[in-house]
Image (tube, helix red, strand yellow):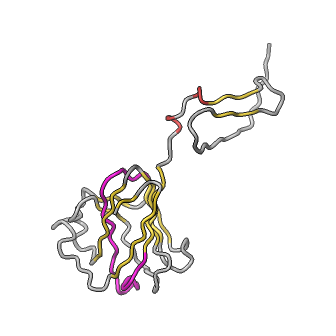
Amino acid sequence: DALSVPGTLNLSGTTVGATDDGDYEAGSGLEDFGPVVWHKFDLAACADISVAYCGTDPAFQNLAAFLARTCPATDADYVLFTSGDFDACGDGNGTVLWDDVEAGTYYLPVLQDVAASANGPYTITVEAVSCVVGIDELTSADWSLFPNPGTGVFNLQYSGKNGLANIVVERSTFRDSR
């Protein structure tokens, strides 16, 4: 499936009958990870990705928190999660997040873990949003501050491309000693 940025994929399936046959490179640290079901997606551009199991019943209490770049998965090619929790869904299911994932093909494993209720039908929402643009991509020519000098009320104007910007205002005192 193609995952646009921004974009959403809705995935569903079941872990009943999942195996780990041929899923991991022999001798890798993933070899004994456990049986999984795989979903492949192609990411169009750099993105922050969230994978949410919200609504899955019973709640999956154990999740695979990596993305593989190849099949079978190897130690050298997987992307570990950035963060995750079991609170965001509000129903006991987990959410896993990855920041700054490069464009490319990825395989999302859905773990079967009978002891942790991660067994049976599931529903997953995969969302991608654009990677955060660093300040080094902006130039000072895009910004203007007026009046300058001023008496306490200033206007900050941005003339660059449309988008979000974070502005931090700090109190500073400067006294001209001339």
Identify the residue at image location x=32%, y=69%.
Answer: 39
Q: Residue at x 39, y 53 (%)?
A: 101
Identify the residue at the far right of this view: 151
For residue 46, above or below residue 79 = above
167 lies left or right of 37: right
Residue at point 38% right, 82% down? 118
How far from the left and from the top, in percent, is residue 156?
70, 34
Q: Is residue 118 magenta?
A: yes
Residues 130 and 99: in front is 130
Residue at the extreme top of the image, as rendered: 178
Quadrant position of residue 169: top right
Tell me the quarter of the picture where residue 115 sits.
Answer: bottom left
Residue segment shown in magenta: 100-123
Q: How many marks?
A: 0
Left or right: 92, with 63 as reference point: right
Residue 7 or residue 50, whichever sits in front: 7
Q: Is residue 170 magenta?
A: no
